[in-house]
Image (cartoon, coloured by chain):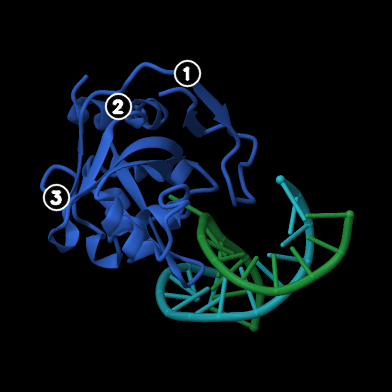
Chain colours: A blue, B cyan, C green
DNA sequence: AGGAAGATGCTCT
DNA sequence: GAGCATCTTCCTA
């Protein structure tokens, strides 16, 4: 399935379908890539755990845009986290990218992270390693500089509760690719 | 290995 | 002014 089709479909399917695909950033001129291994689905205004619950605001505006958009927000005043917006337009559904396996530009990521282990195993770490910050909010994965490519690899996907939230915790919308 | 706490800034009530 | 879709360091075992 093409990326465009995937992101236009149901957000849980999109979340699962993003696992195993390649995420590439050309920010700063040095390409960095990961294979996406951990994601969470957020279902817009109907999902109490979503930033879009309660309607559109200046911060979450990107979520209400077209599929493939990036929603980048500041977390706990310190970190950046990135979401891929899903369709249909106006539903504010999005997939939080939580972790991956670094495959390209390792040295660049090490420099940005200030260490050589645990480069991309968390949403904040992932953004830091790939140079993603608030200026990428409202950009999109079809035009870059952050792009998604490849097809998902076969592997077993486990579902569990989303991390760090206090509302709608029973929804098992965190997905991890266990085998790659 | 695992829990506690602090850092820090922005959004929305 | 409260509450975060987090990460790191600093402890105790």
**Mark 3 touching mark 2, by CB under 8 A?**
no
The part of the image, by quadrant, that contains residue A92 is top left
The residue identified by callout 2 is: A9
Crowding around mark 3 (Cα neighbors within 10 Å: few <14, some 14 to 19, many 20+) is some
Disc nearest the viewer among 2 and 1: 1
The residue identified by callout 3 is: A144
SS label for mark 3: loop
SS label for mark 2: loop
**Given the image, what chain letter belongs to the residue carrying mark 3?**
A
Q: Nearer the viewer, residue A49 or A137?
A: A137
Crowding around mark 2 (Cα neighbors within 10 Å: few <14, some 14 to 19, many 20+) is some
Specify whether residue A57 is in view.
no
Q: Residue at x 39, y 40 (%)?
A: A100
The residues tagged by marks 3 and 2 sit, at their Cα atoms, a distance apart of: 21 Å
**Given the image, what chain letter belongs to the residue carrying mark 2?**
A
The residues tagged by marks 3 and 1 sit, at their Cα atoms, a distance apart of: 29 Å
The residue identified by callout 1 is: A156
Q: Residue at x 60, y 50 (%)?
A: A165
Q: Nearer the viewer, residue A180 or A163?
A: A180
Q: Percent from the top left, x then y, of residue A30?
A: 16, 56
Asked if badge 3 and badge 1 are on a common chain, one would say yes
Compared with residue A154, is residue A177 higher up or lower down, i.e. above or below? below
The reply, left or right, for residue A3 in relation to residue B5 is: left
Q: Percent from the top left, x then y, of residue A140?
A: 19, 49
């Amino acid at each position: 399935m093409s990326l465009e089709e995937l992101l236009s479909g149901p957000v849980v399917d999109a979340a699962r379908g993003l696992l195993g695909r390649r995420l590439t950033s050309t920010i700063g001129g040095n390409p960095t890539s990961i294979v996406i291994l951990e994601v969470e689905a957020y279902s817009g205004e109907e999902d109490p755990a979503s930033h879009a619950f309660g309607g559109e605001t200046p911060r979450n505006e990107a979520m209400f845009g077209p599929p493939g958009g990036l929603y980048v927000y500041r977390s706990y005043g310190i970190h950046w986290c990135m979401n891929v917006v899903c369709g249909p337009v106006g539903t504010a559904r999005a997939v939080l990218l939580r972790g991956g396996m670094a495959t390209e530009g390792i040295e660049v990521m090490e420099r940005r992270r200030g260490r050589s282990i645990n480069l991309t195993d968390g949403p904040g770490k992932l953004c830091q390693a790939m140079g993603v910050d608030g200026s990428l909010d409202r950009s999109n994965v079809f035009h870059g500089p952050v792009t998604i490519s490849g097809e998902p690899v076969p592997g077993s996907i486990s579902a569990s509760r989303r991390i760090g939230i206090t509302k709608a915790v029973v929804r098992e919308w965190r997905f991890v690719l266990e085998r790659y």
